[in-house]
Amino acid sequence: MRNRGSLHAQRLRAAYLFMLPGMAFFLIFYLYPLIQALRISLYEWSIMPGQGSRFVGATNYLRALRDPIFWISMRNTVLYTTVTVPGQMILAMLVALALHAIPRGRVIFRTLYYLPVITSWVVAALLFKFLFHSQGGLINYLLVDILHLADRYIPWLQNPETALVAIMTLGIWKGIGWSMVIFLAALQDIPLELYEAAALDGAGRWGRFRYVTLPMMRPTAIFVLVMLVIGGFNVFLPVYLMTGGAPMHRTETLLTYMYNEAFNFLDFGYGAALSYMLAALIFLLSFLQIKLLRRPMEL
Amino acid sequence: MVANPKRRIVEVAVLYLLLGAGAVATALPLLYMLSTALKGSVYVLEIPPRFIPERPTLANFIEAWNSNNFSLYFRNSAVVALSTTVISVLCSAMLAYAFARFAFPGKDLAFYALLFTLMIPSLTLIIPQFMLARALGLRNSLAGLVFVYVAMTIPLNTFLLRGFFEQLPRELEEAVWIDGGGYGTIFLRITLPLSAPALATAAIFTFLFAWEEFTWALTAIDVEAMRTLPVAIATFHGAHLTQWGLVFAASLIAIAPVIFLYVMLQRYFIVGLSAGALKG
């Protein structure tokens, strides 16, 4: 027989026992490193154990603001996000609308469009390096030998501007399927009665799209936008594997620069400061997007 | 409302054409990868490019698997991904159960801490995680990978499962309670079995994350014998710059299990994504 008097204590004990294993992993390998990274960013960190690290306050952060490579990385990161996010969203929306409108074959098309999403970033980055190869790459072949849009092969990855084009093409190709699946699910959730009511009110096709589909898709579109912007600012692997930031740091993004500073130059303090600036930026942007785009009733 | 049926047929045909063209453009790079892997190394950078190899051969697959330790990397990846999945899903389910069914001091704080971290770039943590792994002797060990992957997947899994647990009816749990069962019995006998679809979704996404993760594996592991597939493929590419057929054969070996999982369990992928959309 249970002791009813200690029911509360018993529930409390059970709750903490259920929390224990998960929280232990989370606190040790996630939250502690998160706080530790902030601390490291305020030091001229010495990587040798035993040697003292010097507290330098905001020096690492101020250094970034005066560092031309930091600004190149920032520009490239912003450029990548502003090109790939709308690119993915618009194409994904068009595909989702088309899939929603066809009578059959939806599953097979959805599977095909989703294939790039389940291809790992490492494989996708190497594949695009091959496609954009300066000599026998498929892209050069299509542009020069088939479409005659260029008269000679372009050294895509050797030149900073064209390298970014290749990287952004990869970003869009890889991401369309993810947004498309979410958009398609949201389209299928719109109640048919709404379209019928709009049609009764005399709305044509455009009217039904404008006054039913678009408003009903809005919360989903905001969610996708926020997620993709976070993903865009986190761009790392395609750059790291396709150009490594070369030539002369001109294709560097915030995370590739951070990783190089930390693990090639072993400047942990500066690397931690760079990553904290990115985290703060992402946090701020996500907050602003939700604040500005959400209507009060959706909150 | 009633459209001209002829016009409707033309429209649908145009849609199929456009969707088909888009699907070809999407799948073409992957097909080209497959055909390159099936060619002998000599023919790889041929102009004009050939999509159907003249003499398809599995030589690249056999060489990648046998002569470059790929079976070892495959096993490392499998051990890491499976351990991560089991530990992370179990820990997340327990956490989610506590959040869904109990009131206790610190609950909101813990929940918002988890939620907040969903926005943090995971590379923000990599420097302290590296130092931590070094201090705990977890560098160059698969356990070091698993612990970090578990920590990184717990927030999203907990979130997903908590939403599911909250919608489960309480009547069954109360019946077990009245019969004298404790919370452990309720969790194991009622909550987990009823949540199989949500658990499957969490498991799939966790497995994929751990199977594909590159940066932490690159940073934490220096020893060749402990490498996982993504790092092995990138290193392999660095070492065999011109042998694209070999690199792509290795890549295809690495993504084959993922494509298999996706084709078999497609509906759980969709459920997971939609659940993610709902939380927005």
Image: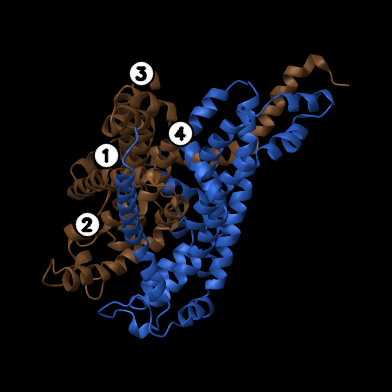
Residue A13 image offset from top left, x and y in percent = 71, 26
Reading the image, the residue beneath label 4 is A189
Say whether residue A269 is visible: no
Q: Are marks 4 and 2 in contact (CB under 8 Å)?
A: no
| Residue A290 rendering spot, x and y as whole percentages | 34, 28
Q: Earlier in the sequence, mark 4 or mark 2?
A: 2
Q: Amino acid at mark 4?
A: Asp
- Asked if badge 4 and badge 1 are on a common chain, one would say yes
Q: Residue at x 75, y 32 (%)?
A: B186
Question: In x, y percent, where is residue A240?
Answer: 32, 58
Say whether disc 4 or disc 3 marks the residue closer to the N-terminus: 4
> Which residue carries the number 2 mark?
A165
Disc 4 versus disc 3: distance between alpha carbons?
22 Å
Secondary structure under tag 1 reads helix
Label 3: how many residues lie within 10 Å, few (<14), some (14-19) or many (20+)?
A: few
**Which residue in the structure is indicated by mark 3?**
A296
